[in-house]
Image (tube, rainbow, N blue to C red):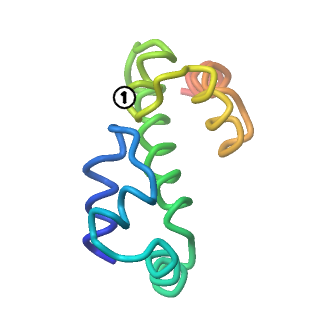
Amino acid sequence: LVAAEEYMRNNFSKGITVEDTSEYLSIDRRYLYKLFKKYSGISPKQYLSNIKIARACDLLLNSDMSITDVAEKIGYTDSLQFSAFFKKQTGISPRKYRNTSQINS
């Protein structure tokens, strides 16, 4: 599990998937899922999403990068797809997150 987490943390910006992770580790995707659920309580997909969201939030708050650039930094080639992912995970758009957080600072 540690190797999977490390691989995801080191490569999430390349747009990797859970399938890429299981292939890298030479284990079945379903087995990787079982390991994650057993030891962390979340799926490998959610773990990967958590890494991406944490990095995106950091970049949105601590840089003046465009939304498109933030999307690319976390592995998205399409900023609309990134915005949809971000909103699904956080409940608000990247732009609103940045603006609201800056107001509260």
Q: In which quarter of the image is the N terminus?
A: bottom left
Q: Position of residue 7 (x, y in %)?
A: 27, 59
Residue 102, position as x, y percentages in the image: 56, 21
69 to the left or right of 86: left
Above or below, comparing residue 10 to residue 95 in the picture: below
- Image location (x, y in percent) of residue 55: 41, 40
Mark 1 neighbour class, 10 Å CA radius: few under 14, some 14 to 19, many 20 or more: some
Left or right: residue 45 versus residue 6 is right
Camera-side residue of 50 and 34: 34
Asked whether 2 or 29 is in front, the reply is 29
Answer left or right for 98 relative to 65: right
Is 6 placed above or below 34 here?
above
Q: Is residue 82 left or right of residue 3?
A: right
Secondary element type, mark 1:
helix
Give the residue pinned by disc 1: 73
What amino acid does circle 1 point to? Lys
Please give the count of numbered marks on the rendered protein.
1
- Residue at image location 38% in from the left, 20% down from the top: 63
**Residue at 46% from the left image edge and 23% from the top image edge:** 77
Q: Position of residue 47 (x, y in %)?
A: 49, 61
* Residue at image coords 41%, 34%: 75
**Location of residue 26 with respect to 69 vertically, above or below:** below
